[in-house]
Image: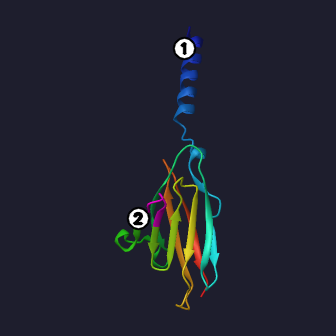
Amino acid sequence: MKKFCLIITSLLFLVSCLLSCDDISQEPRVKQEYLSFTAKGGKQNVEVVLKRYSWKFCGLLDPERNYVMIDSEKIENEVLENGVQRIHYDWITFLISKDKKNIEVIVDKNYTKKTRLIVFDGFGERVDFNFRVFQAP
């Protein structure tokens, strides 16, 4: 009887461990974690791999200020008539497709003669993802 109880207890413990594990393999992620632009600016696309969970825009991080989140009041965030989400801040615009599988990144010409860097942060069900955008002086 003790052996039977031990087996049942062990089995229940094993099942509870397996069910309690977080499966983050179904979370969204980006294929490109780093985009580089010349001083002329331009456009590039970031592909978001969606499996089970969708994602939402969290914010933009400023590496020059120890990766502090940029105040949302300084960021233009709107959904266009075609369902595309447009996020604009200072020198950079992100166009998120309606199905959230593609982010078009548009960078203005760099007149500052300084290197520019910003981090885009998105959040899935339980895990966030981000990518960096670098622009040469």
Residue 23 at x, y percent in the picture: 57, 41
Q: Which SS class for mark 2?
A: strand
Q: Quadrant of residue 110?
A: bottom right
Taking depth in this image into account, of 34 and 92 the one nearest to the observer is 92
The residue drawn where x is 61% and y is 78% is: 42
Q: Quadrant of the N terminus?
A: top right
Q: CA distance from mark 1 to mark 2?
A: 59 Å
- Amino acid found under the numbered disc labelled 1: Cys
Whether 20 is drawn above or below 133: the answer is above
* Label 2 CA crowd tier, 10 Å (few <14, some 14–19, many 20+): few
Residue with the mark numbered 1: 5
> Which mark is first along the chain, 2 or 1?
1
Residue with the mark numbered 2: 78
The residue drawn where x is 61% and y is 63% is: 46
From which residue to which does the magenta span run? Answer: 80-86
Q: Which SS class for mark 1?
A: helix
Q: Quadrant of the C terminus?
A: bottom right
Q: Residue reaching furthest front?
A: 81
Q: Quadrant of residue 13?
A: top right
